[in-house]
Image: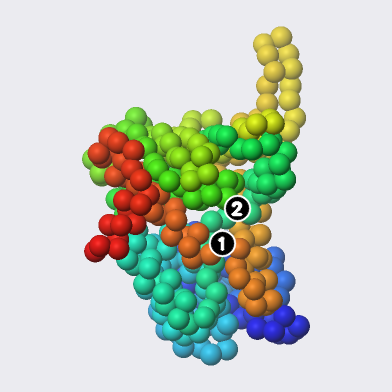
Amino acid sequence: MDATSSRKVRVGLIGAGRIGSVHAEHLAYRIEGVELAAICDIHLPSAEKCARKLDIPICSDTPEEILENKSIDAVVISSSTDTHATLIQAAAYSGKDIFCEKPIDHDLSGIDAALEAVRKAGVRLQIGFNRRFDPSFRHLREKVRSGRVGTPHFVRITSRDPAPPPIEYIKVSGGLFLDMSIHDFDMARYLIDSEVYSVFALGGVRIDPAIGDAGDIDTALISLQFENGVLASIDNSRQAVYGYDQRIEVFGSEGVILAENVPPHRTFCSDRNGVHGPLPLHFFMDRYIDSYIEEMRSFIESVRAGTEPSVSGSDGKAPVVIGLAAQKSMIEKRPVLISEIQQGVNQS
């Protein structure tokens, strides 16, 4: 689309679940230069509910009506992970620009097929790593890139959920490394601006035995070594009883910079028993609501201006490779080179 065009970007939304409904509301009310024209969900009542609330004219239980509609410029894919790669390919063949929630797929061959379809069609693809658009994390990155802490030596990322998801979700999530840690792998790359060279991961079941019975872990400690020599540690937990714990530290030759938790307010009470303040925000949507708006605004702006999205398809693939390396490392109890995962794909 010509950058000087005043016509709004017409968007079709595929998937009207929790995150899809959030994207729909942002597209309808909070982002300029866009018109949410259609919505679909395999569970038609979900699509109908969202369409009624936002006054969306086209509603269906299959994506074909969106993909075949030549007046729709772009699609937002927020359906289940197992549909992402197929829908990306279908949207690319339809000539539509694409925003897709992470991950593209749990299988690297599926990711490669989707990215090849995007390349051949010449359309834009942005992956939904929303934390890159968080004001605190973005400011931290700007300070690191400006040299404020000198040469980075070490990154520490803490990411802990307030409570585990349902076991039925755990069973289809792809595992903690591909579901939860994947955000942290992306954030580490985003902050350091280098590729990961090797991964060493430890994991266990410390919260709920049912998670182990489902074939997953709920607690993990992951070490990354980057090609530029920077080291990173990531700790994940499915349950932090005090709230949604999201902290980052970058230590360098000239200092350290930290992004702390975001509380609902910043008032403190001091009395004879101590200093008392609020717990961190408890729900991920509250913590990252601004970042969800900004990532979608960035996508729409890239479509309008004809520029490349800020989170590319290769950015979507890299954290999955790291996650697969972490799985292999935990199982084999050794550091795993990223090249081992990539060679395995090339040989298959």
Residue 153 located left or right of residue 6: left
Dot label at residue 311:
1
Q: What's the residue type where badge 2 is placed? A: Arg
Q: What's the residue type where badge 1 is placed? A: Val
Q: Position of residue 50 (x, y in %)?
A: 54, 69
Q: Report crowding for label 2: few under 14, some 14 to 19, many 20 or more residues within 10 A (C-alpha).
A: many
Q: Quadrant of residue 87?
A: bottom left
Please, what secondary structure does the residue beneath circle 1 have?
A: loop
Above-or-below relation of 137 to 321? above
Total of numbered circles in the picture? 2
Q: Quadrant of residue 261?
A: top right
Q: CA distance from mark 1 to mark 2?
A: 9 Å
Residue located beneath label 2 in the image: 132
Q: Residue at x 43, y 71 (%)?
A: 115
Q: Position of residue 7 (x, y in %)?
A: 71, 85
Quadrant, the C terminus:
bottom left
